[in-house]
């Protein structure tokens, strides 16, 4: 654990040093954020802020993890093959997110990004491929699930594959919805990866502990520049990559039933969007005019429109997330 914490510090230093250069590069190529015109008024001042800041997280995580596992990777040990899974997921989803970010700035659909249907198709295919690879390797907990109160893993067989694919897909999009306020997604992801790092430690998966805390350090570095008022945004490059990787890590620990607890804020954000859409469609059919359950979704915008400041929303959501992470680790101890 001590080495994992040192790695988190190294990751932080490496990422925070490369931050100003990344901001200059993004500004030079005018990779700036487009703002929803129907969003809270205070967000209009963020127009043009550099996005694709997720590169600040992904780059150091990949470099440090490869350097740390170079022997296992060259020797093709089980640990070497295993660490390639979250690394591959992070890189692949970062690429999908980067395409979406660039399309939103320079493409025909400025401000909207890559067409949602095409993007979701790519994500479904990628999620299925990752789940299948994890099952066939096989990883330690592939095909299994840990259940609180039952002190042995429950075998699911091939049924695990579509479940795993859905978990990766939903996790990536949940974090994507959470990334809407300065510092929100970064703090939430740092907490969630820290929680799963502790769970991996309890299982003796040292390489996964190290990976999780490398991500935590990089998230902290990103928050250095994303704290209100943000100098850069994570973009889909970071949010999709972090979300999909978190789902993958949860599957690798076998404690993926706890993901809705450990990632409580992203789950709440996603549920608010789903409920908003369903309620609007129901009331439109029932009364001829759609009504809103929330003032605006995702959930963080609802609280902003209730009068909470952006920093109040982020700090309160972060406190709830920390408590949820602690609850998730406690439930893992009970498994």
Image: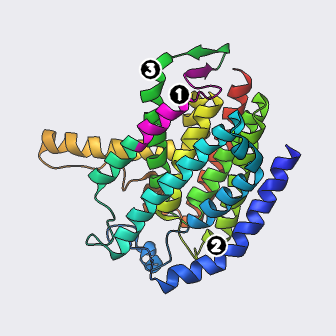
Return the residue nearer the eye: 285 or 119.
Answer: 119
Q: Quadrant of residue 278?
A: top left
Front position in the image: 223 or 87: 87
- Which quadrant holds the C terminus? top right
Question: Residue under circle 2?
Answer: 225
Identify which residue is drawn at 45% across, 77% down. 31
Asked whether the beta carbons under mark 1 and mark 2 sit within 8 Å of each other, the answer is no
Marks 1 and 3 sit apart, C-alpha to C-alpha, by 10 Å
First along the sequence among labels 1 and 3: 1
Disc 3 secondary structure class: helix
Identify which residue is drawn at 43% across, 74% down: 33
Front-most of residues 299 and 190? 190
Distance between mark 3 and mark 2 Cα atoms: 42 Å
Residue interval drawn in magenta:
126-147
Q: Which residue is mark 1?
A: 135
The image shows residue 91 at horizontal and vertical percentages of: 54, 55
Badge 1 or badge 2: first in the primary sequence? 1
Q: Quadrant of residue 25?
A: bottom right
Mark nearest the camera among 3 and 2 is: 3
Q: How far apart, in angstroms, are the residues tagged by discs 1 and 2?
A: 38 Å
239 in the magenta segment? no
* Outermost residue, right side: 2
Find residue 73 and report its horizontal and vertical position in percent. Answer: 69, 45
């Amino acid at each position: 654990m001590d080495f994992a914490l040192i790695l988190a510090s190294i990751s932080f230093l490496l990422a925070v040093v490369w931050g100003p250069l990344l901001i200059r590069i993004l500004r030079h190529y005018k990779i700036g954020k487009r703002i929803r015109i129907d969003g809270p008024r205070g967000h209009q001042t963020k127009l043009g802020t550099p996005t694709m800041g997720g590169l600040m997280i992904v780059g150091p995580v990949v470099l440090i993890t490869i350097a740390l596992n170079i022997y296992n990777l060259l020797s093709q040990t089980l640990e070497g093959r295993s660490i390639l899974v979250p690394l591959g997921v992070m890189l692949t989803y970062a690429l999908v997110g980067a395409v979406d970010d660039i399309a939103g700035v320079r493409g025909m659909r400025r401000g909207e990004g890559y067409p949602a249907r095409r993007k979701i198709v790519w994500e479904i295919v990628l999620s299925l491929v990752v789940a299948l690879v994890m099952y066939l390797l096989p990883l330690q907990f592939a095909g299994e699930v840990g259940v609180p109160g039952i002190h042995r893993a429950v075998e699911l067989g091939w049924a695990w594959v579509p479940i795993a694919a859905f978990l990766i897909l939903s996790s990536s999009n949940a974090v994507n919805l959470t990334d809407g306020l300065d510092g929100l997604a970064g703090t939430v992801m740092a907490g969630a990866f820290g929680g799963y790092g502790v769970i991996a430690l309890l299982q003796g998966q040292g390489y996964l502990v190290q990976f999780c805390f490398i991500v935590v350090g990089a998230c902290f570095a990103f928050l250095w520049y994303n704290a209100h008022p943000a100098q850069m945004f994570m973009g889909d490059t970071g949010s999709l990559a972090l979300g999909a990787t978190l789902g993958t890590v949860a599957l690798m620990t076998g404690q993926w039933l706890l993901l809705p607890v450990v990632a409580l804020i992203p789950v709440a954000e996603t549920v608010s969007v789903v409920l908003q859409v369903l309620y609007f469609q129901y009331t439109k059919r029932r009364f001829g005019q759609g009504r809103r359950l929330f003032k605006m979704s995702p959930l963080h915008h609802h609280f902003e429109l209730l009068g909470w400041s952006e920093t109040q929303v982020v700090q309160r959501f972060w406190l709830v997330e920390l408590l949820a992470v602690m609850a998730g680790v406690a439930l893992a101890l009970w498994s």
